[in-house]
Amino acid sequence: MQKDNYITISTKDFSELDLLGRVIPAVEKLHIRSATKDAREILRQPRLAIVGSRKVSNYGQAVTKKLSYDLAKAGITIVSGLALGVDSLGHRGAVEAGGQTIAILPCGIGTIYPRSHVGIARQILDSNPLSALISEYEGDATPGRHHFLARNRIIAGMSDAVLITEAAIRSGSLSTANHALELGIPVMAVPGPIDSPTSQGTNNLIKSGAHLVSSAQDILAIMDIQPAKATLRTYQPDNDIEDNIINLISSDIRTSNEIIKKSDFTPEQIHQSLTMLEIKGIIRSNDYCTWHLL
């Protein structure tokens, strides 16, 4: 367990926080809890807010964890609110990737809310020296009802873009998207099943003009970060067959027949491994039966 440092900064002293002067009400001070004492280091990387519903479907869980993991690996700081559901999943994905994540609290910097997330908060602080808990409230202040929506303006104002991975029609996370639109920063949303109540909010955002995204590459492009310079999830093959297939696809040998011809394994082994790699989200085929690495 690392030693936590507590620092207080004036947002006016940081150009990276200029947008916090434009939210209503403006944010003048922030209290930070982190392993580092250097607030500028915490703010050095590009920052993406990942938010959404507290009640999240299996689909939403998988999407949030994958995107937050991949983006944290790519050097993006994941900003969220430590709430139940999408928020905590976004933090967890970044923690698992060994990346940086920032949790904006609705309570004093000296306490954690919800209390069930004390463990996640500890993981955030211990997993990366530049990860942090941040609040506009001092000490052990308990959260009032208005603190939760007030927190959303900070999440938006501290981020270079906002991503909603899953949200119901009345999800409070949509207020974060509204703050982002008012500040002029990109809003992105992951589409969901048209009959899923937990995707109605995100689907409506897309219909209203939010960027539709389905991969880390989509998000990096919108944030104007070159995917070639980012380090996305690196997959460690489970066996020699998977290793052989990945190497062949990387060498532009992309159809199943070509892979079988160039491989030392049986057609049955190749087909089974191709299916497993697709299920794991490592490869995908298009309509022409050509395989691509994700």
Image (spheres, rainbow, N blue to C red):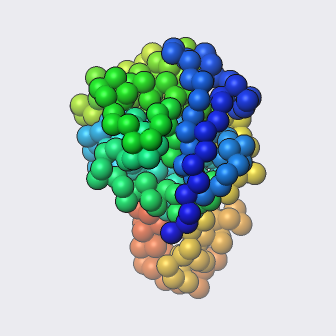
**Relative to 220, residue 291 above or below:** below
Note whether 281 is above or below 105 in the view shown: below
Q: Quadrant of residue 140?
A: top left
Residue 219, visible in the rendered structure? no
At a point 57% along the width and 49% down the height, the residue shown is 6
Q: Position of residue 229 (x, y in %)?
A: 75, 51
Would you place residue 263 above or below residue 246 in this image? below
Residue 117 shown left or right of residue 74 in the figure: left
Is 46 or 3 nearer to us in this picture? Answer: 3
Establish if 285 lies above or below 174: below
Q: Nearer the viewer, residue 166 or 10?
A: 10
**With 136 as the anchor, is 279 left or right in this view?**
left
- Image location of residue 1, percent across then percent down: 51, 69
Residue 181 found in image quarter: top right
Quadrant hosting residue 17: top right
Q: Give me the residue at 59% from left, 54% from top.
A: 5
For the residue pair 282 and 114, the one nearer the viewer reads as 114
Residue drawn at x 57%, y 34% is 30
Residue nearest the observer in this picture, 79 or 13: 13
User: How far across and down, in percent of the image, does residue 239 sit?
Assistant: 51, 82
Residue at coordinates 61% horizontally, 44% vertically from top-left? 7
Most extreme residue toward the front is 139
